[in-house]
């Protein structure tokens, strides 16, 4: 149960501070750690990173 960032990530940085479990790492393309991503269950009604991503490049892993 985790979300995944696809190759069309533009490294804008919007998702990183929004993650309640600090599962996102920056880089040329940002990466979500599947070991700690909980798809925001217990924090938000929907995956927060996906909601804030301007290019909609985050999908279910
Ligand atoms: S779905 Fe939620 S917990 Fe998972 S990486 Fe995105 S913001 Fe973090
Ligand atoms: S919000 Fe989307 S485009 Fe921006 S860094 Fe995160 S995954 Fe990449």
Image (tube, rainbow, N blue to C red):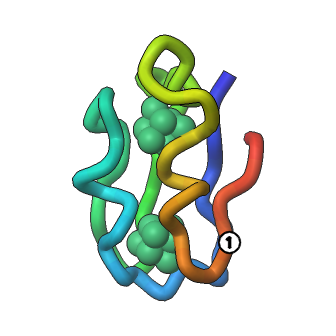
The residue singled out by tag 1 in the image is: 56
Q: Nearer the viewer, residue 41 or 60?
A: 41
Residue sitting nearer the eye, 8 or 16 = 16
Q: In the rendered image, is residue 33 in sight?
A: no
Residue 40 spot, x, y in % from top left: 51, 27
Residue 43 x/y as whole percent: 43, 21
Residue 56 vs 20, above or below: the answer is below
* Residue with the most extreme front position: 45
Q: Is residue 40 visible?
A: yes
Q: How far across and down, in percent of the image, does residue 52 sit?
A: 49, 63
Residue 46: where, in percent of width, then height? 63, 36
Please report the residue visible at 39 percent of the width from the left and 81 percent of the height from the top: 11
Q: Quadrant of the N terminus?
A: top right
In the rendered view, would you say 33 is above or below 21? below
- Disc 1 Cβ-to-ligand 2 distance below 8 Å: yes
Q: Quadrant of the C terminus?
A: top right
Which residue is at a point 65% across and 59% down the rendered structure image? 58
Helix, strand or loop for disc 1: loop
Residue extending furthest top?
Answer: 42
Asked whether, in this view, residue 28 is left or right of residue 41, the answer is: left
| Residue drawn at 55 percent across, 79 percent down | 54
């Amino acid at each position: 149960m985790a979300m995944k960032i696809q190759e069309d990530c533009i490294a804008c940085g919007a998702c990183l501070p929004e993650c309640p479990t600090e599962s996102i790492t920056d880089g040329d393309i940002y990466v979500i750690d599947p070991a700690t991503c909980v798809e925001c269950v217990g924090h938000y009604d929907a995956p927060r990173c996906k909601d804030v991503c301007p290019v909609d490049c985050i999908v279910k892993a």
